[in-house]
Amino acid sequence: MKENTIDEHLRRHGVKPTAVRSLVWKEVRELTETFSLADLERWMPTMERSSLFRALRLFTGHHLLHTVDDGTGQQKYCVCRCDSEHHINHIHFTCTRCGKTYCLEDFAIPVVTLPQGFQTEEAEYIVKGTCPNCAG
């Protein structure tokens, strides 16, 4: 994705491109596994933590990223490729050996019928086990 395409992508999602936002999106847009603010700080050591955090929050609010609670106690982010802004259409897999969490976009969360009066706003479905990198 070229620089101007990155800015166009951000604009399509209602995000005003800035240098920081474009650089952060360029860094994370191709990831297929989750990442944390700490990961982003390691990958972009010249950026201020607060600037990175603000970009992540903005991207989450505009459905470029979604958050994942993988049980580690650390907020994780995943690039959103969902059709729904509620992120209810795919599962995540957390490797119990390496700790990485992956979006498994081709595997849908089973439909859960709720009792009358309950309305789904978000659904998280995490499968835990061993990833292909750790299995061998």
Image (cartoon, helix red, strand yellow):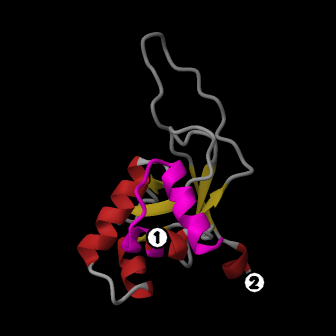
Q: How many numbered tags mark residues here?
A: 2
Of labels 1 and 2, earlier in sequence is 1
Q: CA distance from mark 1 to mark 2?
A: 37 Å
Left or right of 19, for residue 8: right
Q: Quadrant of the C terminus?
A: bottom right
Res 60 seen here: yes
Which residue appears at 58% of the width and 37% of the height? 84
Name the amino acid, label 1.
Ser
State yes or no: residue 60 in magenta.
no
Q: Position of residue 16 (x, y in %)?
A: 40, 57
Within-10-Å neighbours for mark 2: few <14, some 14–19, many 20+ = few
Identify the residue shown where x is 45% and y is 73%: 24
Instruction: Please indicate whether residue 105 sits to the left or right of residue 87 in the image.
Output: right
Q: Give whichever of 3, 133 is nearer the camera.
A: 3
Residue 8 locus on image (x, y percent): 56, 58
76 to the left or right of 51? right
Tell which residue pokes out farthest to the front in this image.
Answer: 4
Q: Position of residue 15 (x, y in %)?
A: 42, 54
- When the figure is inspected, residue 107 is found, relative to residue 40, above or below; the finding is above
Q: Amino acid at mark 2?
A: Gly
Mark closer to the observer (1, 2): 1
Question: In front: 122, or 79?
Answer: 79
x%, y% of residue 60? 42, 53
Q: Which mark is residue 22?
A: 1
Viewer can see residue 79: no
Does 3 lie within the magenta span? yes
Residue occupied by mark 2: 136
Q: Main secondary structure of the magenta part?
A: helix
Q: Where does the magenta region start and end? A: 1-23
Question: Most extreme residue toward the left, as rendered?
Answer: 50
Give the residue displayed 56% in from the left and 77% down from the top: 97
For image coordinates 30% across by 63% down, the residue present is 54
